Image (spheres, rainbow, N blue to C red):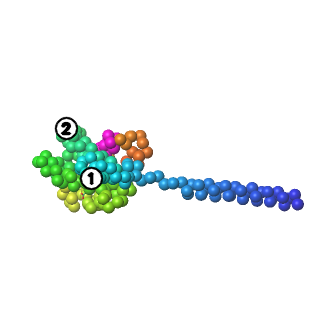
Amino acid sequence: MTKFSKSSILALFLGALLMTSCNDDDTVAATPEKPSIYARLGGTTLVADPDNAGQMIEQGRLSYRKVVNTTVGLIVADVQNGASGNLGAHFAPVLGEVGAGNTTNLGILVDNLTDFFSFNTGGTNPVNTYSGLDMVNAHNPATNPRMGVKSTNANYDKFVGYVGAAAVQNGVPANSELFTDVVAVLESLRAPIVQQ
Ligand code: HEM
């Protein structure tokens, strides 16, 4: 009788342990997912577009467009200053046009980059639909004559540095989780873009 009681108690104890660990699993499974990068940059909330009077724009898209414009400005400044490791050779076609006063294709590039980043980080409304080339073809001069020369790892590091600096300039703190998540997305695209 005593023996039976002991094993019953042990069974009860083990059962309780098992239930506790099941509950723990349920708790983990129920942890809410982190919002997308697009959502954390302002998401689909419509705001007045500062560059187009009378138009509205999703805040997430506006955040990306600002970062893209700042990135372009940083690339151009380094080319103009002759900074070491600048990306003048890669962007020569578009920079030549801009130098001659034609900004049409620069506008298309900014739009395509904004679509690309927005759509691929959670901004999937039709306004962000990307209609450009895939990353391999976009960065191969043989399939995209607008790409002056192929990119090396060092060129890629430089580019990621510009985007990171542009994000900081537009209010994403460098030591934040959001910043780390943006850099991780950029890193995930290194293999198709670096082609030499
Ligand atoms: C995360 C990294 C990058 C992303 C997401 C990215 C994305 C893009 C996208 C979406 C386009 C437009 C393609 C089209 O319109 O069909 C593009 C074009 C281009 N990219 Fe990148 N890119 C990255 C890195 C780089 C790097 C490292 C370089 C050079 C070192 C570079 C140079 C160019 C050039 C020269 C063009 C063509 C510009 C033009 O149309 O005038 N990109 N890129």
Element type at mark 1: loop
Q: Which mark is residue 10?
A: none
Residue closest to the eye, 3 or 24: 24
Residue type at mark 1: give it.
Gln
Q: Where is residue 81 in the image (x, y as percent from the top left)?
A: 19, 38
Q: Which mark is residue 55?
A: 1
Number of numbered discs present? 2
Residue drawn where x is 67% and y is 58% of the image: 19
Towards the viewer: 13 or 129: 129
| Residue 47 appears anywhere in the view | yes
Note whether 153 is above or below 77 in the view shown.
below
Q: Is residue 165 magenta?
A: yes
Asked if the beta carbon under badge 1 is closer than 8 A to the nearest atom of ligand 1, the reply is: no
| The label number, if any, that marks residue 81 in the structure image | 2
Inspect this view and state whether residue 159 appears.
no
Q: What element carries label 2?
A: helix
Taking the spot 20% from the left edge, 49% from the top edge, the residue there is: 91
The residue shown at (33%, 50%) is 47
Q: In this view, does 17 lie above or below 168?
A: below
Magenta stretch: dominant SS?
Answer: helix
Amino acid marked by disc 2: Asn
For label 1, the crowd category at 10 Å Cα-Cα, with few meaning under 14, some 14 to 19 and many 20 or more, is few
Name the residue at the front extreme: 54
Residue 85 locus on image (x, y percent): 24, 42
Q: Tell me the quarter of the image containing the N terminus.
A: bottom right
Identify the magenta region.
162-170
Q: Is residue 104 left or right of residue 66?
A: left
